[in-house]
Amino acid sequence: MNIFASDFLIIRMKNKLKIFGIIVALQAVLYLIYTSLRAQRLQEIEDINQDFSITKGVVTRRSTTKGNNVWVKYTVNGVDYVNSDGFYEFQKFKVGDTVKVKYLNTNPDIMITQYNNDF
């Protein structure tokens, strides 16, 4: 093996290490974003369960792509809200069904539906 081939292999190895480092860094950033969003949602649920009211809403959309989400339209003090919450696949409902909504009294935009385990 000549010197040029050896240098080429070293450069290739350094490039692979850089790519590996970038991938690890991106995964770390994504993990931090996920854990931050999850902590925020858990705090919202805790806040709801400390100061809430319950109303009825109507399912406007249901999605099982990239997670299970249900969108619900509900009214609080004459103001309409449309928000989403998660659900488990075994829960059977369809668009147009009535659903119970538990919302935060100080901010009705923050809610959970009866399909949430923390309801």
Image (cartoon, rainbow, N blue to C red):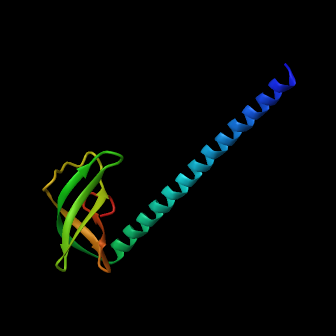
Q: Nearer the viewer, residue 75 or 90?
A: 75
Q: Residue at x 76, y 34 (%)?
A: 11
Q: Position of residue 44 (x, y in %)?
A: 39, 69
In the displayed structure, 97 sits above or below 110; it is above
| Quarter of the figure that contains the C terminus | bottom left
Question: Looking at the rendering, which quadrant does residue 7 occupy?
Answer: top right
Q: Position of residue 25 (x, y in %)?
A: 62, 50
Residue extending farthest to the right is 3
In the displayed structure, 32 sits above or below 9; it is below
Residue extending farthest to the front is 4
Q: Residue at x 30, y 72 (%)?
A: 109
Q: Nearer the viewer, residue 43 or 82?
A: 82
Q: Position of residue 75 (x, y in %)?
A: 18, 72
Q: Residue at x 45, y 60 (%)?
A: 38
Question: Looking at the rendering, which quadrant does residue 16 occupy?
Answer: top right
Q: Position of residue 35 (x, y in %)?
A: 50, 58
In the displayed structure, 59 sits above or below 65; it is below
Q: Residue at x 33, y 62 (%)?
A: 118
Residue extending farthest to the top is 1
Q: Determine whether, in the image, residue 109 is placed left or right of residue 16.
A: left
Question: Looking at the rendering, which quadrant does residue 15 occupy?
Answer: top right
